[in-house]
Image: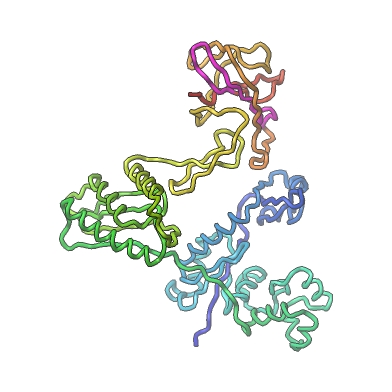
Amino acid sequence: MRQSRFCAAKPGDSADPPIAVIATERGVRRVHTVNAAARARGVRVDLSCADAKAICPDLLTRPHDPHGDRDALERLALWAQAFTPLTAADPPDGLWLDITGCAHLWGGEARLTARLQARLPGARIAIADNASAAWAFARYGEPDARDLAALPIAALGVDEATQRRLRRLGLRRIGDLAPLSRGELLAGCGAETLARYDRVRGLAPDIVHFLPAPSDQTVREQHAEPLLTAAQLGGALSRLCQKLCAELTVARVGMTALTAQFHRVDRRLETMRLGFSHPTRDEAHIRKLLQNGLNQIDPGFGVEVILLEPVLADMPDSQPNWLDPAPMDEAHTLDLLLARADLQRFVPRDSHIPERSAQRAGISVSPSSFPQTAQPRPAVLFARPIPIQVIAEWPDDPPRMILWRHQRYRVFYANGPERIARDWWRFAPDPAEHETERIRDYYYIETQEGLRLWVFRAGIYASERPSGWFIHGVFA
């Protein structure tokens, strides 16, 4: 029986600037992870952020996002399925690839390693007969290391307390465990260390949860005689739609978007894209949207291949409520609008800065309510505040007259200020930036000409430098 071969990878040295990931623990911001450049400058894990900045003034910091890191690692594991169908994420920073029977497709293990190294610059890659050994060599072995006995005890993956206890017993490397009997290992090291020792030597199986391959529900139809008329294209789309919806029903999934590709005989590609407000596999509704979009397709000298490529989403089976069909009708109506116009849905974002407090999201994303504010918000918010000139009685008073677009407007009513500061937890302070530029005082004003505007003063008044005024929005 052919022996299994595992490949493990973890981040390694690179030419990046010093970077540290900061996590908040018991109200104190501490270093959670550092790269090789920061480690070389003396920054280490568990240092406070202030101490790390004192050691390395040009240290770049990023907030710790464990959920985002896990999602990114799983996406990287899915990307690695281009090399082998069996890949798994090894949190917090590793990947496992089962390359049994796959290495020859890439010219051997050495060439496969070189290709992975080129795609993942700076990563440490090791190949061994089992997952635990590959993990140990990738993290604690030298390049091209093959001697498992020379690796430190930490390569077993045991915790710090176990490592200290084993070092007190004189056991510093994996090879130091070989002379001991299983009874002595169990009594002196514990059952968990013995189990890890068996797994790294291949005496016990590794439990690796491989990621399933992303399901491909793309359907296609190829024609020996090119299709020229709308009736022919419509018939082909109906057949493909029926086949696609049947596969989605079996898989118990729906789609939030659909791309129809029309490959012409002159090698040109015509594309039709549809978006859905909710996951759907309603064949009649999808067929209607496809037929409505056929007028956008130019068949040219004929279409020989048609593909339907959906974007999948979970859609468990449910009992339709025939007494209240309104939600279904609303979704269908919104889908028809999506097919005729470019609609966007906005969802709240974790920021107090007005231009950053919302972000675009897919139309299929569930709507979220925006938090209530103490003061009203304008109906039209400019993407970037527009500078204006202001005359005020005192520097901290609301404006009495503004100059905007080369026109003067006299203010007869003003309400405010509403102070909004920069998101200090998201943006690191810039030493070159004045403190006052991080604060905005917003005013609601009405002019004698009937304009209702949202203006703000950037920064607290300082005699050595004037404060800037901006208009940020217009009320209805």
Q: Residue at x 44, y 76 (%)?
A: 104
Q: Residue at x 57, y 11 (%)?
A: 412
Residue 127 drawn in magenta: no
Q: Which range of residues does the magenta coloring cover?
A: 433-455
On whether residue 437 falls in the magenta region, the answer is yes
Q: Quadrant of residue 311?
A: bottom left
Query: Residue 61, image x and y in percent?
Result: 67, 47
Compared with 63, 241 (above or below) is below
Q: Is residue 32 left or right of residue 386?
A: right
State the image coordinates of residue 281 (x, y, percent, origin top left). Answer: 36, 58
Rendered view: 368 above or below 3: above
Q: Is residue 411 visible?
A: yes
- In this orientation, which residue lies closer to the viewer: 169 or 227? 227
The residue at the point 68 percent across, 80 percent down is 195
Q: Residue extending furthest right?
A: 168
Question: For residue 333, which quarter of the picture?
Answer: top left
How many numbered marks are there?
0
Q: Nearer the viewer, residue 100 or 113?
A: 100
Specify whether 267 is left or right of 100.
Answer: left
